[in-house]
Image (cartoon, grey):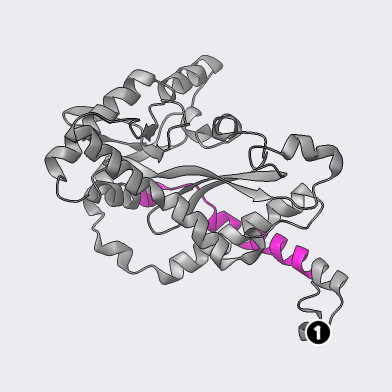
Amino acid sequence: ADAVDEYVRIGGSTVIESFNRFVVAIDEVFGEEYLRTPNENDIARLLAQGEERGFPGMLGSLDCMHWQWKNCPTAWQGQYKGKEGVPTIVLEAVASRDRWFWHAFFGSPGSHNDINVLQRSPLFAKLAEGQAPKVNYSINGHDYTMGYYLADGIYPSWATLVKSIKLPQGNKRKYFSKAQEAARKDVEQAFGVLQARFAIVRGPARFWKALTLNQIMRACIIMNNMIVEDERDGDFDLVYDEMGEQVGGSHERTTNFNDFISQYEKIQDKEVHNQLREDLIEHLWNHHADRY
């Protein structure tokens, strides 16, 4: 606030109040459009981008970012202090190649790791409740009905997550690991772009309330997505018409708790995860061997 008081000719407290009202207004007016979960058209575009890069069924990349909380109340510092050694708040996000954030879950204490944050986040809530659009694709002769996200090694082996291979053996697996790690950088690059565009989320947070920090982060992500939409150049010249056949209407809603548990077991199926990764290894080697 002190950096702009002479320029805007208002006091520091007025700057802060105006800023708080601004970020709340951004979320209320534009949040529904620019922080939406992917609809059928969005999923068709994401599938086309993923297939063009050698990953059929990919919906984006998943990772977490820590935002330092400089003015964290003393009583909370033990809860918010993690491996960084200072209090932080975690942002879990899914981003696509054009740096659009399709999922943003902010507010977990910095003492949590990526697995803890995933267990708390609503990333797969609609899928578990049977409300997410259907995603149908085939790889190496096997049919799949759920899209997936690229993630790093700390994440669990779920059917909806594709991880790299630690210490890969053989050319095929080495090639897959290289391709997966290259594509997974999308979300890390999106974090870098977000911090470069909005200095407030790059430096330590100076507000006292976690709710205010949540409103700031959401507003910055919304404005980032608005910039991405404005600068989008023909969606990388990809054609999505054929992808419409792979995306259907929503699943039937789960009618009881047992259906909900059954759907979650499908999401967390380790056998499907291993089979999907093996199919992707063969697909990349056979169809995209000269890309990475």
Q: Residue 142 at x, y = what percent? A: 21, 27
Q: Quadrant of residue 122?
A: top right
Q: Residue 275 at x, y = what percent? A: 27, 24
Task: Please name whichever residue, 62 or 169, is drawn nearer the observer in this view of the structure.
Answer: 169
- Residue at the farthest left position: 286
Please tell me whether the stretch drawn in magenta is mainly helix, strand or loop: helix
Disc 1 crowd, CA 10 A, few/some/many (<14, 14-19, 20+): few
Q: Is residue 72 left or right of residue 159?
A: right
Q: Residue 274 at x, y = what percent? A: 31, 23
Q: Is residue 139 visible?
A: no
**Region in magenta:** 18-42
Q: Quadrant of residue 75?
A: top right
Q: Quadrant of residue 132?
A: top left
- Residue at the farthest top position: 258
What residue is drawn where x is 50% and y is 33%? Answer: 124
| Residue 19 painted magenta | yes
Task: Please name whichever residue, 88 or 57, is drawn nearer the observer in this view of the structure.
Answer: 88
| Residue 64 painted magenta | no
Q: Is residue 99 above or below residue 14?
A: above
Q: Is residue 142 left or right of residue 44?
A: left
Q: Look at mark 1 in the image and give the residue it sits on.
A: 6
What residue is drawn where x is 67% and y is 63%? Answer: 200
Q: Is residue 55 above or below residue 26?
A: above
Q: Is residue 153 left or right of residue 19?
A: left
Placement of the N terminus among the 4 image quadrants: bottom right
Q: Is residue 87 visible?
A: yes
Q: Is residue 192 above or below residue 184?
A: below
Task: Please name whichever residue, 115 or 225, is drawn nearer the observer in this view of the structure.
Answer: 115
